Amino acid sequence: MSGFTQLFRSWQPRAIGSLFIITASLWAFFAIADEVFDGDTQHLDDRILRALRSPDDPELLRGPRWMKETVRDMTALGGYTILMLTTFGVAGFLFLAGHPRDARFVLTAVAGGWILGYAIKWGFDRPRPDVVPHLSDVMSSSFPSGHSMMSAVVYLTLGGLLTNVVPGTRLKCYFLGVAVFLTLLVGFSRLSMGVHYPTDVLAGWCLGLGWAEVCWLVHRSLMQRTAAPSETPLGIPG
């Protein structure tokens, strides 16, 4: 408890902001889940998926012919292989750069998000959309979108770390903006490929954002409570 008390005293605005984001994200997730499983969103979900396809041939996406290949590239940004390689690559750099606690934070946040996401998928067990043909093979259930959730967890976590490296509000906003943009691209690609409903993607974003903020609060608190003289926070010279 003393760690969180110290956190609020020395980092109050950021901590309050994180608590607000966590509360809002979880509220939005459960609100979406309630609407989904009451069946209130099904008509709108189906309409949006159909609107992304050609009215003459549901196998084809609206737009130029290269759109199909583009959304496949975009969805790879949220694929578990790419996210795993990115996570281990960044964690390895942090270990070698003398920031093992930040490295463990990244690994724990991503692993915990993955476990949470699959546990919730198993609990809700929503079938995949069948209103349009799928443009990729899928095996797990639909709610929430794992790609959307994990891209939020990974990119927002790494974006948050990078804000500790650079000075000035402009660069911090740039890194967070890139993280949000990549997360949005992944979610849009899942809709375009017909493998998720819009509500799956929204729920994944909410859950991923909430989890990333929870991990940041805990990490910051532990760093302040147990900081060693030989290890300073990432990007802050000792």
Image (cartoon, grey):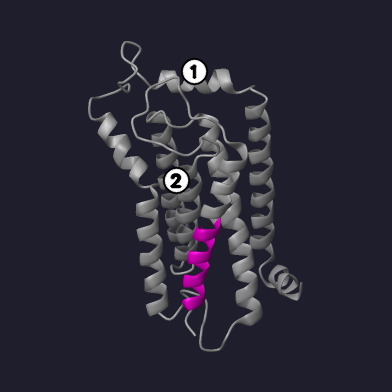
Give the residue at mark 1: 47
Give the residue at mark 2: 183
**Residue type at mark 1?**
Arg
Q: Are marks 1 and 2 in contact (CB under 8 Å)?
A: no
Return the disc, 1 or 2, that comes first in the chain's sequence.
1
As drawn, the residue found furthest toward the left would be 65
Question: What residue do we see at 43% from left, 18% from top?
Answer: 50
Relative to the observer, which residue lies in front, 41 or 164?
41
Main secondary structure of the magenta stretch:
helix
Question: What residue do we see at 64% from left, 50% from top?
Answer: 21
In which image quadrant can residue 37 be found? Answer: top right
Question: What residue do we see at 47% from left, 26% from top?
Answer: 129
* Magenta highlight on residue 105: yes
Depicted 18 relative to depicted 192: above or below:
below
Q: In which quarter of the image is the N terminus?
A: bottom right
* Magenta highlight on residue 185: no
Mark 1, secondary structure of its residue:
helix
Work out how far the residue at label 1 is from the one at label 2, CA to CA, in angstroms.
23 Å
Depicted 183 relative to depicted 101: above or below:
above
The range drawn in magenta is 100-112
